[in-house]
Each structure stands twice: as C-alpha cells, then as structure tokens.
Image (tube, helix red, strand yellow):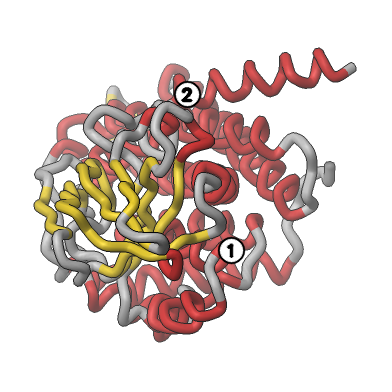
Amino acid sequence: MTAFSLEPSQLARCAELRTLAAERLRPLAEKGEPGRVNRALVAELGALGLLSRLFTAGALDLCLMRESLAQACTEAETALALQGLGAHPVHAHGTPGQRERWLPRVSDGTAVAAFALSEPGAGSDAAALSLRAERDGPDGWRLTGEKCWISNAPDADLYTVFARTTPAAGARGVTAFLVPADRPGLTGSRLDMVAPHAVGTLRFDGVPVTAADVLGEPDAGFRVAMDTLNLFRPSVGAFAVGMAQAALDATLAHTATRDAFGGRLKDLQAVAHQVAEMSVRTEAARLMVYAAATAYDEGADDVPRRSAMAKLLATETAQYVVDTAVQLHGARALCRGHLLEHLYREVRAPRIYEGASEVQRGIIAKELYKTLEAR
C-alpha cells in the first residue's frame, strides 16, 4: 500500500474545488429549502462537470472531491454524493439501455437519483429487508412494502430499489431494480430530520417492474448494494474528514484571536493540547480514508475491511473534533447560522448511515477472522 502524500496536481484540484464550493455552490445552498432536494444546486454541480466525474473517477478522486467540497459547503458535498450513491448501481450494473437513459441526466443534474435500501425493520441488517417483489407474469414483478430513511426521497426521479425476490433466502434472495419515480403505485413522504437534506419514506403498492428494470441479476442484488457501499464508505469518511478540517480551521482562527484570562485562548495549555489532539485525529482519519480508497482502486482483497475501518475512524473522529470545536468556541457556536452549529447537526448522521459504527466494527472483526482462517 502506498504511503500517502498527494501530488501537486491533486492538491491544486482540491484547492480549486474549495474555491468553487465557497463562491458558486454555497450561495445556491443557502437559498435551498431544508428537507427538500435543491435542484438548482444539483444543476450547478452538473454544469461544473462534477457529477459526470462520479462515473469516471476512482475511489481516491471521489474522496478528494467529497473532502474538499465538505470543507466549504456540506450541502454541495451531500448533493454530489447522493447522486453518486443512487446512480452508481446503474453505472456499474445497469444495461446499456438503462445507462443511456439515465446517466446523462444524472450527470448534468436534470435527474436526481436515490439509493433505496433501508426499511423500517431493516436498517443496519440490510439482508433482513422485506420489501416484496412478487412474480407478475413470466417477465415481471410487483413491489409491495416500504422503504424508510431514504436520502433524496420523495423528490428523486429514479431510485435504486432493493427488494426480496426469494423469501427466506437472506442476502441471496434480494434483487436490485431501477425504479423511475413516476411508476404507478409509488408514493412517498418527507421526514423531519436533524440534517438539512431531503430524507423520506417510500411506499410501494404493487409497483410494476420487469426484467428490463433489473440491475445486475435476479437474486444478486445484495452484491450490487455491497459493491456500491464498499466504494462509498471510504468517501463517507472523506466527507467526515472535510467537516473535521473545517471545524479545526475555525477553532484555530478563534483560539488565536480570542482574548481570555489576560492572554489568548491558544496560550492556555489545556486549549492548545485539545487543538493538537483535534489535528492529530483528523490527519490520522484522512490517511486511513486515502489508504482505503487506494485499496479499492488497486482491486485489493481487503477492501471491505479497509472501507469499514475508514468510515468508522473518520466519522467517529469528526464527531469528536466538531464537538470539541463547539466547546472551545462556547455559546456562540450554538447560535443558529454559525458554522459549528451547522456542522454539529451534519456530523451526527454519518455515524449511522451506510452502516452504523457498530456494523463497521462487525465487518472489521469478520474480515479479520476470515483472514486468520484462510492462513
């Protein structure tokens, strides 16, 4: 595994993305309505060519994009990531017809994608999902059930939906379907969440799908889900690292100028040591994210373990760094509209979605013992 230092061209690209996020994306984000897809922001991501890179970039490039955008505009980062999460199964497992119909629209920002895996009774235990796909003729199914906690729902234009095609078969009986939002029987509603982006439920009342809507192969949808998550889990870590870096930067600026006890906050050893700890943890998480992304790009055998480790460390680190930043800023950080108030709301969810921290620990342990048994 490569010891990590970014090339000058990568550093320049990251700086460019931070500037674009601050100057062109943040103003659009500020005009968005909380809890709804900001289509103007998605369209601008498309116009800047960032969405099309989702389907040409490697895992490391995806991580650098997400980290850089997150430092300056978390809403833009999330809009980009959700387009990728929802449409990656189409890109990686779709038919030529599916790709030709949807990927250009996702890339230019005129179609919003969503990844519909979680259910009211099957969140972390994705193999336990119960959305039913019942046979309807030789070439079709009817989807019946509910999805919950779905980002971009109910505003999205297309959904990657995972449904049970073989009862009592666990992970082996799940099929991935590409379901346009205008299919009869598909409805949804919004959930009022702490994070500002759209999250909702989807209800399937006999929604018709055919073999032309299958992503990959019937009963092989769990592989589609895990392939997508193995790519995006390190980049969730990159999102977290970006937030941690933004909180650290704000804390450095604040403690260097804030008068307290006859000097500056930074002169207090307790404060200086906390800032140092924030920096060490952020850099450690960044390096683990980059290592996991490189492993994915190189086709390494230990991608599931590395992806889980990167997401776990980075999201837990970001929670610590943002919380410490709030503490060092004091009450001002709790005022509505303050950067840290915003980050404090944003930083909690990544420890849950795409596999909670406890799930990541389970994956890591399983992979470690699998390696031991293979020796």
Q: Is residue 265 visible?
A: no
The kind of residue on which mark 2 rests is: Val
Q: Crowding at label 1, few (<14), some or many (≥20) Cα neighbours within 10 Å?
A: some
At mark 2, the secondary structure is helix
Q: Nearer the viewer, residue 137 or 183?
A: 137
Q: Crowding at label 2, few (<14), some or many (≥20) Cα neighbours within 10 Å?
A: some
Examine the image and state in which quarter residue 340 appears.
top left
Residue 164: x and y in percent read 38, 41
Residue 92: assigned label: 1
| Vertical order, 347 against 160 (above or below) | above
Which residue position is annotated with label 2? 359
Q: Nearer the viewer, residue 95 or 92?
A: 95
The kind of residue on which mark 1 rests is: Ala
Position of the C terminus, as image quadrant, is: top right
At mark 1, the secondary structure is helix
The residue that appears at 51% across and 42% down in the rendered structure is 222
